[in-house]
Structure formats: C-alpha cells, structure tokens
Image: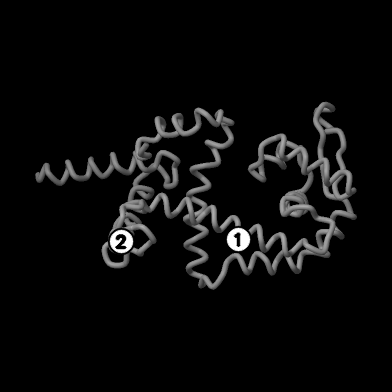
C-alpha cells in the first residue's frame, strides 16, 4: 500500500474539517467530494484567471478588496433605494424592507422581525414604532404569551408598499447590474456562504470591543 497517498488523504480530510467549521458542506463523504471538486475548480481558475485589483502589486490582500467592495456596494444599493422612496412617506429603505418581510412571511414578534433584518434591538424598535405611527403595521397580544406582541402589516401598509413596488423592483434590478444569469447564481451561492458564516456570530451579540478577538480565536483560518 502507498502510505503516502493515505497520508495525503488524511491531510485533505483535516483541511476539509477546518474549512467546514460552519458546515457549508455536509459532514460526510458527499460533502467532502463536493468540497474537493470546488477546491480543484477554484485552483484552476486562480492559476489561469486570477483578477487584478488596485494595490495588488503593493501587497493589498484579497480580504481587503472583498471588505471594501461590500461596503461600496451597500452604499450604491442605498442610493438606489433612496431614489425608489423619494416621493413617498417611507423614511428609509428599512421601512419597506420590514413591510416586505411581514407581507412575505406573515405576522411575527418584534424580535423575530428585527433579527430577520439583522438589526440591533434599539434600531429595530425605532423602525417598528415609526411604522406603527404611520398605521402600516399593528401589534396584538400573542395568544400563547400575553407579554409578547405580535405585529402584522395592515391594509394601509400593503397599499403604501404596493405604490412603491415598481420603483423598488427597478432598484433591485439596477443593483444586480449587468451580471449574467450564471454570474447571479454564483454570487448568490458565495454571498449565502458568507451570510451562513457571519449570521450565527452576529446573533451571539458579542461586545464590540471583544468581537474580533473572539472570532479570530475561534476560527483558525482567520489571520490577525
């Protein structure tokens, strides 16, 4: 038996286990094979078609580029959202996103809605209270726990949302730019993987001063 091959396989399995800490792939043979295929595919792409980015020749890291691009894209998206609600009673894009979530997923508790939008409680409550004052959402006591409030979109909220939906849809199409269908599908996959990594960390409400240290210690592939 070629024990060097066994050793290589074991090293690959160890690498798979390290990189799959967030369970992006099933923890079985099929997951390992899928991870290995993607790893090889990325290796070929990186060797033959690694993109250029500003500052690359001076040692700027790909992580820096990704972080900066996400910040910029968020700002671009907000500018289109601002245009979509410019002639309405919506104050921010969060207003219509909260309504869209209630329309799509139905009534829920305040904290469920806030968590779905990845907001801190204080920020989320301000948005919810503003929507209540506008008459776009209502709150009722939970049937199972009278201490908990359940909120739902009102007919007035539905009407206000529908009046802006054409512009909101246009804004979302513009944000996707000139990406092809296959590029959109690949971007959804990559962004989904990133969200799957970050959301559980965010949900733990780690203090800001400790956040980077805690995450860096828990995930060995992150470099300080």
Mark 2 packing: few (<14 Cα in 10 Å), some, or many (20+)?
Answer: few
The x, y position of residue 98, in whole percent, is: 74, 49
Percent coordinates x, y for residue 15 in the rendering:
29, 42
Asked whether 14 or 206 is in front, the reply is 206
Q: Relative to 142, is 188 on the left or the right?
A: left
Q: Which residue is mark 1?
A: 76
* Coordinates of residue 182 in the picture (x, y in percent): 48, 69
Which residue appears at 42% of the width and 45% of the height? 26
Q: Which mark is residue 105?
A: none
Hey, which quadrant is residue 39 in on the image?
Answer: bottom left
> Is 158 on the left-hand or right-hand side of 76?
right
Query: Alpha carbon of mark 2 to alpha carbon of mark 1: how far?
Result: 28 Å
In the image, is residue 65 above or below residue 178?
A: above
Q: Quadrant of residue 213?
A: top left
- Please give the name of the residue rendered at 79% of the width and 64% of the height, measured from the top-left corner: 164
Q: Where residue 16 sits in the image (x, y, percent)? A: 33, 43
Q: Residues within 10 Å of mark 1 (few under 14, many from 20)?
A: some
Quadrant into which the N terminus falls: top left
> Mark on residue 46?
2
Which secondary structure lies at badge 2?
Answer: helix
Instruction: Looking at the picture, tell me which residue is in the foreground, 71 or 104.
Output: 71
């Amino acid at each position: 038996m070629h024990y060097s091959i066994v050793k290589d396989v074991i090293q690959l399995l160890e690498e798979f286990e390290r990189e799959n800490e967030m369970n992006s792939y099933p923890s079985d043979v099929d997951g390992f094979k899928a991870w290995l295929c993607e790893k090889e595919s990325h290796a070929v792409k990186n060797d033959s078609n690694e993109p250029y980015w500003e500052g690359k020749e001076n040692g700027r890291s790909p992580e820096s580029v990704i972080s900066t691009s996400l910040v910029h894209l968020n700002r671009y998206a907000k500018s289109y959202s601002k245009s979509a609600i410019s002639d309405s009673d919506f104050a921010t894009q969060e207003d219509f996103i909260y309504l869209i979530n209630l329309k799509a997923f139905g009534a829920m508790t305040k904290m469920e809605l806030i968590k779905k939008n990845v907001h801190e409680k204080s920020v989320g409550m301000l948005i919810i209270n503003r929507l209540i004052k506008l008459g776009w959402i209502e709150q009722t006591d939970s049937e199972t726990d009278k201490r908990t409030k359940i909120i739902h979109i009102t007919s007035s909220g539905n009407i206000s949302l529908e009046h802006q939906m054409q512009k909101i849809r246009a804004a979302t199409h513009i944000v996707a730019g000139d990406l092809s269908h296959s590029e959109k599908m690949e971007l959804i996959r990559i962004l989904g993987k990133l969200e799957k990594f970050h959301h559980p960390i965010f949900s733990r409400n780690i203090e800001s001063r400790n956040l980077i240290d805690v995450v860096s210690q828990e995930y060995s592939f992150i470099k300080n």
